Amino acid sequence: MTKADTHDRLTRCKKILGDLVAFPSVSADGNRAITDYLADALTQAGARVEVMPDDTGLQANLFATIGPDGDDGVILSGHTDVVPVADQPWTSDPFDMTEADGRLYGRGTCDMKGFVAACVAMASEFSARALKRPVHFAFTHDEETGCFGAQRLTALMHSRGLRAQAAIIGEPTLMAVIDGHKGCYEYTTRVTGLEGHGSSPDLGVNAVEYAARLALKLMELRHALKARAPDNCPFDPPHSTLNIGALRGGQVHNIIAGSARMDWEMRPVHPSDADFVKAELAAYVDDLRAQMQAIHPDADIHTEIVAEVVGLIPKDTNPARDLSMALTGANGAGLVPFGTEAGLFQSIGIASVLCGPGSIAQAHKPDEYIEIAQLERCLDMLHRLGKNLERA
């Protein structure tokens, strides 16, 4: 690989990244335009491309392949949605990428359009190689709001019997190889009671009081989860966690609260911990509901699933980890505290890791950026991947 090749590859990547940043693909607004751009770019590079819109047509996944058919390929995966920029003090237009001091600034440069751009920039080189195993591109929607696109995509892959040797999800890890993170399960619990005058609390059903009792139950379960921590668990903390993010309800001090809402989450080390919490909470809710409905038959407690995204469980045997370490020269793999789509690929039997350019420390912040040197390292990894896929 010559210096000219490296320069051309980086130039191509930066141009694509600038194009991607220009799409304001905030999760709530849809990603169809950026997906259509990627579909066109990959088609021109020789890929077999399928765009998979959701029912609204505003959101879409993309799955593309270069090389032969087969179950021994490698998936390169990233999400195309970004978080909002509203009320953030940017010093430049977040959707007009700028370069300064070896960095590229713009919403999504780090999380995670930089990796997507690098993959697309390498697509023509993959096509030019005599690949004996395929490379797949999996670009998803709505990761930032609950990994909804990846849930749809992996379910479809599973139903079609689509397999791969490994999946590399290019979340920003500073190009470190990551083979584990906890799951992320988010919920909203709504309590409906019966309003009344505050001077006669026994004649109403105070939704805030029942929500508070639910909160206390979750705090009890938090301690129970600590006791369930597996031996030699590598996570920090080494047990599943619970957090109550918000508790709202009522109107003023002298009205019995007729409604309340609690937003909460758990980060399970293993799905069995999530099952434990849900079973314990369901039994407790049944008891509370009976007490409430004894006063007011229409009183109720209902929990809405915002998202249930499984974690990436470290495995003794992980071909994706071994491949990524060989491609990057890493001598080990680590863990991260944040959630990703990787566990969804693992859940359908595809060995998965995180490995991508940029630092999570820059994600979601004003003046988000990626170091150009990080893109160069990612492009080098993908160049090595192409050579790897040429071998039988």
Image: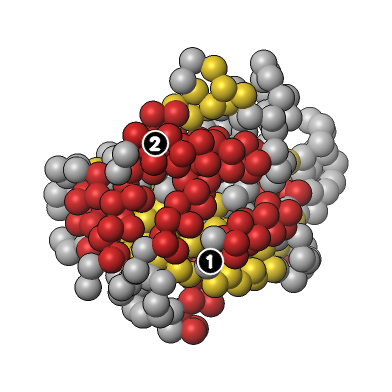
Residue 373 horizontal/vertical position (percent): 39, 29
Dot 2: element: helix
- The amino acid sitting under disc 1 is Gly
**202 with respect to 137 (left or right):** right
Amino acid at the residue labelled 2? Ala
Please give the name of the residue rendered at 71% of the width and 24% of the height, measured from the top-left corner. 93
Residue 10 in view, yes or no? yes
Indicate which label's residue lies in the foreground, 1 or 2.
2
Q: Nearer the viewer, residue 286 or 125?
A: 125
> In the image, residue 212 lies at what x, y percent?
59, 43
Q: Position of residue 265 (x, y in %)?
A: 50, 48
Decide if residue 304 is in sight here. Answer: no
Which of the 4 quarters of the picture holds residue 4? Answer: top left
Pointer 1 residue: 46
- The residue singled out by tag 2 in the image is 4
> Which residue lies most toward the right here?
197
Please identify the quadrant where the C terminus is shown. Answer: bottom left
- In the picture provided, is 82 more to the left or to the right than 153? right
Looking at the rendering, which quadrant does residue 161 occupy?
bottom left
Disc 1, SS: loop
**Compared to 214, does 301 lie above or below?**
below
> Is 390 drawn above or below residue 86 in the view shown?
below
Q: Quadrant of residue 344?
A: bottom left
Residue 83 in picture, x, y percent from top left: 63, 39
In this picture, is 30 found above or below 97? Answer: below
